[in-house]
Image (cartoon, helix red, strand yellow):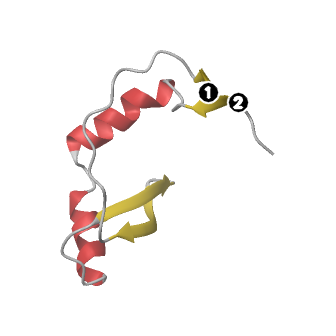
Amino acid sequence: MTENHWLQFLPYLPLRDEEKECLESNSFSDQMMHIFNHANIQYGRIDVGLKDGQIQVWEINTNPVLIGKKTKRECFFIDIDI
């Protein structure tokens, strides 16, 4: 089964400002360092969520792929014809 028309999911726009503020303030750095130290990991990317202000760790990737800054997104979905 193949499809020539795809929809790509983009982040929910109202959350972008909240996410940007969280990243720029680095307010969870002490908690993140505690998690990395507890896991005995010196380098990696941590995937987390917040519930009731508490960090929930999904995974720590010890071999992350680093990518450049993404361009501004204008809509929730974009159409891709291939």
Query: Which residue is at a point 53% across and 31% down the rendered structure image?
Result: 10
Residue placed furthest toward the right: 1
Residue 32, above or below 72: below
If the image is split into quadrants, where does the C terminus sit? top right
Closest to the observer, 19 or 10: 10
Looking at this view, is 12 or 61 the one in front? 61
Marks 1 and 2 sit apart, C-alpha to C-alpha, by 5 Å
Q: Residue at 18% x, 75% y: name it.
A: 42
Q: Is residue 65 above or below residue 58?
A: above
Q: Quadrant of residue 65?
A: bottom left
Q: Quadrant of residue 23?
A: top left
| In this picture, residue 15 sits left or right of residue 41 | right
Residue at 41%, 59% (x, y): give it: 47
Instruction: Please state which amino acid type lies under the numbered disc 1.
Output: Ile
Q: Is residue 57 above or below residue 76?
A: below
User: Which numbered circle lies on residue 45?
Assistant: none
Q: Are marks 1 and 2 in contact (CB under 8 Å)?
A: yes
Crowd tier of the residue under label 2, counting other residues whose Cα lies within 10 Å: few below 14, some 14–19, many 20 or above: few
Q: Position of residue 78 (x, y in %)?
A: 58, 21
Q: Quadrant of residue 54?
A: bottom left
Q: Is residue 4 left or right of residue 45?
A: right
Q: Which residue is mark 2?
A: 4
Residues packed near mark 1 inside 10 Å, few (<14), some (14 to 19) or many (20 plus): few
Residue 57, position as x, y percentages in the image: 44, 66
Q: Which residue is mark 1?
A: 82
